[in-house]
Image: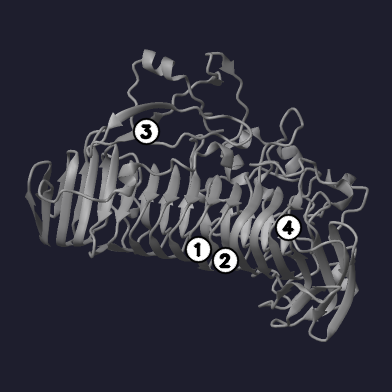
Amino acid sequence: MKKQVVLKLLAAMMAASLTVTGCAVTNAAAGNKTTVTAEAETETSAGDTETMSADAESSEGSSTEDGTAEESTEGLLVKLEDLDLTDQFSDRDLDSSYDESTAVKISLNGDSADVTGEGASAENGVVTITAAGTYVISGTLNKGQIVVDAADTDKVQLVLDNASITADENAAILMKNADKVFLTLAAGSTNTLADSAQEYVQPEDMENTVDGVVFSVCDLTLNGSGTLNVTAGYKHGIVCKDDLVITDGTYNITSAGKGISANDSIRIKEGEMNITAEDDAIHTSKDDTEGKGYIYIEGGTLKLSSGDDGIHAATALVIAGGEIDVTKSYEGLEGDTMDIQGGEINVAASDDGLNASSNASASDNQDDLDFADHGKRPEEGGEDAVTSATPRKQDGTSQKSFGAEAADASQSNSAEDTAGAPQEPSDRSAQGMPEKPADGEKPSDGEKPANGEKPVDGGRPSGGRGMHSDPYAYIRISGGTIVVNADGDGIDSNGSLYVDGGDFTVYGPTNNGNGAIDIGDGSDAAAQITGGSVRIAGSSGMAVTFDDSSSQYSVMYNFDEVQKAGTMVTLKDSDGNVILTMTPEKDFQSVIFSSSSLRAGSYTITAGDIMDTITVDSVSVTAGAASAAGRMPDNKEGNE
C-alpha cells in the first residue's frame, strides 16, 4: 500500500518553518479524503503573483479550520466540485510576452552555442541555465541539450525563436530544477526538438528517469503563438513530473510512447495539438499525491491518434470546451470520473469510446480493497499497472476479453443468439473494486441528479457484466456535441451515467459482447437522463437504456434483424413531426432516442422499409423485438 498523503494546517507548517514552493491547484479527493492546501504568495520574475501550495504529511488525518483532527478515509480520487475551474491558469501562464532587450541570448551553432548575458553557460554542446530570467534561444544544435538547473524559487522563461535541437541519448530540453519553467514559442517561429531514438543515458544527479524529448521535474507552462515540432523516437514527447499548463501554440508531436504526459495535472486553455503516439496521446498519472492526476480542457484544437488511450486521466477528466478529435485509439477518453460540459468531441475507438473506472486510482491502494468480494489482486507491473484502468498483458499492452479484437463477429439475427449473447467479463474486474463507504451511502459524484432520487430498482438497466458497481466512477454529460464510434462499449461507466444536456451520438458496437451503453451492475448505479439529445445505434445483445429515475423521456427500439449501416432511422410524433433522426455509420439492431421534445404519447419509428408504432407511457420505454432487453428483473439478488 502506498503511503497515505494528508495535509496539515498552514499554521502548523509555518510553526515548523517549512518553505512553501511550487505551484498547485487547490482541490480535494473525491467523496473520501479531502486534500487541504496551504497557500502563500510569492513575487514572480514578471512582477505578478502566483498562488503557491505545499503538501504536508500526517499519519493522523487532515485538520479542520478550527484545528481539530478530521478522520480521513481511503481513496486517491478527485471530483469536479473540488476543482476551481476559474483558477486553472495564472496571469503569467496566459502572458507570453517578454523583453527581448534584457533577455539572455543563446545562439546555437551546430555543435556549440554562444551565450550573451548572465545566468547561462555553454560547454560541449550543452547549455546550462542556472538563474531566473528570460532566455531567447535560436539556431541549430546537433547532439546537444538545453538544461535548466536553477534554484527552487527561480522562475525561468525559455523562448524558442526558430530553434532546432537534436539530443544525443537524452532530452533535448531537460528541466532538472526550478520553481517553474515557461517554454514560450516566439510569434511566427517554427521550432524542432528531437531525440536520437536510442535509450537515454540517465543523469547521475537525478532521481527521476528521463524519458521525454522535453522533460521537466517542475511545473511547466507551454505558451506563445509559434510552432513546436517534437519527434520522440525513444519514448515520450513532452513529460512533466508536476503540473503542465498549455495556453497557446501549435504542437506537432510524434512519439514512440506517450505524446504528452504529466504527473499532477494537464490543463489546456488554447492551442493546436496534433499528436500521433504509440501509447496514450495525452496522459496523467498521480502516483500517491492527493487531489492530483486530473486533466482539464477549456479550449484549443486537439487531433489525437494513439495506440492506446486518446486521453487518459488518472483521476478526473473535465472537458469544458475545445475541439477534440480522437481519430484512432484503443479507448478514446478515460478517467476515474468524466465531466463533459462543452466542446465538439469526436472519438473513434477499437474498444470503449468513453470509459470511467476509479480502479486506476484504487489499484494504488490495493490493501484497501475487498478482493474477497471483488476478485483477485492484479499483478504488479510497470507504470501502467497503477495508472491505467484497463488490465494489461505482461508486455504492458492493453487486453480485454471482448471488443474489437476478441468479439468482431457479426450480430446474430436469431432471438436465441441475441438472448444468449456472450456476457463480457468485467473489463476492470481483475483490478478489484473499492469498498463502499462505511455509512453505506453513495459517494458524491459531482452534482447530484436533478430529482435527488436513487434510481428505481425495477427500471435500472443492467451492465450485463456480473460485477459490482464502482461507487466512485461516473460519466456526466451536461453540454457539448459528442460523437462516438466504438467497436467496444460506446459509453462505459463502471459506476453511473448522467446525461444532463448536450448532443450525444453513438455508433456501435456491432458485436453482441458489448453495448452502446454500459454501467455498473449494482443497485447504486444509475443511467439517468434529465436533458440533452441522444441518438444511439448499436448491437442488441447487451443493449441497455436509461432508467426510470430519469426526468426526460427515452425510447429504446430493438429490431428483429440487423440493419445495415447508412439506413436512416426516424422517430416522429403522432402529428408527423420529426423528433429525432440519425443515419448510423455501422450496422445496428438497437437504437435509443431521447430529447426534450419527447413526451408521453404515440410515435412512429421508421428504418428503411420498416415502420412501427411506439407507445410512450413512461420516461423509459423499450419496444420492438426482445422488448425486455435492458431491464433488470425484480429479483436482483445476484447483482447486489
* Marks 1/3: CA–CA distance: 30 Å
Specify few, some or many for label 1: CA neighbours under 10 Å numbering under 14, 14-19, or 20 or more.
Answer: many
Cβ–Cβ under 8 Å for marks 2 and 3: no
Residue plotted at (67% across, 49% down): 430
Which residue matches tag 3? Answer: 51
Which residue matches tag 2? Answer: 347
Query: Mark 1 vs mark 4: which is more N-terminal?
Result: 1
* Marks 2/4: CA–CA distance: 17 Å
Q: Secondary structure at mark 4?
A: strand
What amino acid is found at the position of numbered circle 4 in the picture?
A: Asp
Query: Mark 2 vs mark 4: which is more N-terminal?
Result: 2
Which residue matches tag 1? Answer: 324
Which residue matches tag 4? Answer: 518
- Disc 2 versus disc 1: nearer the observer: 1
Q: Secondary structure at mark 1?
A: strand
Cβ–Cβ under 8 Å for marks 4 and 3: no
What amino acid is found at the position of numbered circle 1 in the picture?
A: Ile
Residue nearest the observer in this picture, 549 or 466: 549
Cβ–Cβ under 8 Å for marks 2 and 1: yes
Is 417 situated left or right of 197 in this image?
right
Q: Is residue 84 visible?
A: yes
Specify few, some or many for label 2: CA neighbours under 10 Å numbering under 14, 14-19, or 20 or more.
Answer: many
Residue nearest the observer in this picture, 596 or 29: 596
